[in-house]
Every structure is written in C-alpha cells, then in structure tokens.
C-alpha cells in the first residue's frame, strides 16, 4: 500500500461524513484540515479523491478552505454538477457560516460590500479599483466578554471572503493568523484554577481558524434542498469553553 493511501486512515471514513445522498448529489460535513480539491503539489488526501473512491463520477461543486469545516456539495453526474454550478453562478445558493471572532461586536444585518482582488498563491486583498464585487452579511448570534459568535452570509463567493471582510471590521476570526486573528488559550479565559505542567507548552483550544459552513439551501429542477452541518469537535469545544468561562 502506498504512503498516500495510509493517510486515508487518519480521517473519518467518507461514508461517515455524508449528511444526505440521493441519485444525483452527496452532501457531506467536511472535517477540518482536509483540502476540498487537488492542489498543485498533489499527493495530499482531499475530499475529491475520497469522493471518487466512493463514487467514481463524483465532482465537488464548490470548495472550502482546508481549515474550514462544514457543508460541501458533491455531484454524482455531469448534469447535476452543471445545474448546481448554475445556481452558484446566479447566486441562488444560500450559504450560512458560523465564525467565532475576537472582541464583542454587535452586527445586525451588517453588509460589507468591499471588492476583493485575488493576487494569486492564496493571497487576496481589498481593492476598490481592481477587485471583483464581494458582499457578505453579518449577524451576531452569541456574545461573550471577549469574543462573539457570528452568522456570516456570503452573497458572492470570493476566496477568503468572510475572513477578509471580518478583518476589515477589526473582527478577525479566532486563530486566523493571516488576518491578525489570535488563538484562544484556556489560561486566558479561565484565570482561576488553571495550571499547566512546567515542562509542557500550552496549546490553543482550537488549532485552526474558527469558521464552519453551517447550512446551505438551493433548488435544482424544482426540487428544494436544505441542509445543516453540526459543529466539529474543536469548534464545539471552543464554544463550550467560552460559554463556561467567558460569558
């Protein structure tokens, strides 16, 4: 067995990721730290490869950042892939993400309309002159002393859109170091009764940025679809710790 195949065992079985499946589409709850598609380097386990092992004609309809967890749509045939792609292109797919951000922020249908320029190599910037239109709507869901759980509704689908739009509001996602987001350590929120062995270095509660694709809804061929993905363990743990020690 090749080395790359051995890595498959580090992740849940593809079947265990499936939220819904019919003759045309598979909906999964993507775990964090797994890429959606093949990258240029190749050789890395990703959702597309796992999906094709499960169903040879599978095609991933969109992508999530490697560290982002949540809803991902996979077409089982070319026609469904075409129809879903049209829905995305016409902005008729309703996507909802949840993010945990630094600071207490009251967002009430805050609309961030700032063009994004893709500079290549996974680098983007806000560029009013040369960027492509990008719109995200934000609503605060739950408040803590030093953090906020936020609902994010991207109207467009630019690379890093939610992450950079939040950063423009001085509300970077927890752990998103690319946009100056800081990780959360238990010692920071549980000041009393916290202890760590002298020979151990404290690790952040969540070892990625706190962004999860929570739900999606769309219609193809007159058939409505709506799905929700549960939080993965790390996101749920961080939220629980904030509710316990930072409320």
Image: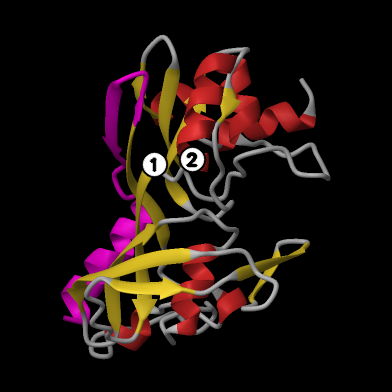
Classify 246 as above or below 94: below
Q: Are marks 2 and 1 in contact (CB under 8 Å)?
A: yes
The number of callouts visible is: 2
Q: In what element is the residue under mark 1?
A: loop
Region rendered in magenta: 219-247
Say if the magenta span includes residue 94.
no
Left-right relation of 120 to 158? right
Colour pattern: secondary structure
Toward the viewer: 233 or 167? 167
Tell me what residue is drawn at x 27 percent, y 86 percent.
104
Which residue sits furthest right? 41
Classify 86 as above or below 148: above
In the rendered image, which residue does mark 2 sit on? 88
Residue 49 at x, y percent in the picture: 65, 27
Q: In what element is the residue under mark 2?
A: helix
Label 1 crowding class (10 Å Cα cut-off): few <14, some 14-19, many 20+?
some
Cα distance between the residues tagged 2 and 1: 6 Å
Tell me what residue is drawn at x 29 percent, y 44 percent.
230
Say if the magenta span includes residue 222.
yes
Tell me what residue is drawn at x 79 percent, y 36 percent.
43
Label 2 crowding class (10 Å Cα cut-off): few <14, some 14-19, many 20+?
some
In the rendered image, which residue does mark 1 sit on? 92
Which quarter of the figure has residue 35?
Answer: top right
Toward the viewer: 132 or 171? 132
Can residue 232 be seen in the rendering of this structure?
no
Q: Quadrant of the N terminus?
A: top right
Toward the viewer: 223 or 238? 223
């Amino acid at each position: 067995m090749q080395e790359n195949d051995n890595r498959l065992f580090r992740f849940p079985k593809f079947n265990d990721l499936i939220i819904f499946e019919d003759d045309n589409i598979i909906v999964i709850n993507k775990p964090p730290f797994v890429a959606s598609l093949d990258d240029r380097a190749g050789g890395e386990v990703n959702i597309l490869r796992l999906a094709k092992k499960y169903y040879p004609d599978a095609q991933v309809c969109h992508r999530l950042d490697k560290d982002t967890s949540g809803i991902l749509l996979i077409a089982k045939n070319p026609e469904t892939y075409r129809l879903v792609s049209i829905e995305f292109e016409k902005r008729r797919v309703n996507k909802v993400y949840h993010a945990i951000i630094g600071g207490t922020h009251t967002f009430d249908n805050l609309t961030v309309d700032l063009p994004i320029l893709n500079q290549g190599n996974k680098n983007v910037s806000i560029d009013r002159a040369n960027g492509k239109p990008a719109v995200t709507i934000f609503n605060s869901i739950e408040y803590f002393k030093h953090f906020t759980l936020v609902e994010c509704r991207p109207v467009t689908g630019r690379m890093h859109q939610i992450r950079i739009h939040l950063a423009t509001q001085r509300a970077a996602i927890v752990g998103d170091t690319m946009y100056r987001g800081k990780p959360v350590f238990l010692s920071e929120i549980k000041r009393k009764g916290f202890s760590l062995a002298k020979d151990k270095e404290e690790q952040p509660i969540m070892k990625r940025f706190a962004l999860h694709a929570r739900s999606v809804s769309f219609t193809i061929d007159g058939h409505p679809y709506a799905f929700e993905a549960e939080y993965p363990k790390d996101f749920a743990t961080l939220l629980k710790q904030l509710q316990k020690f930072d409320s």
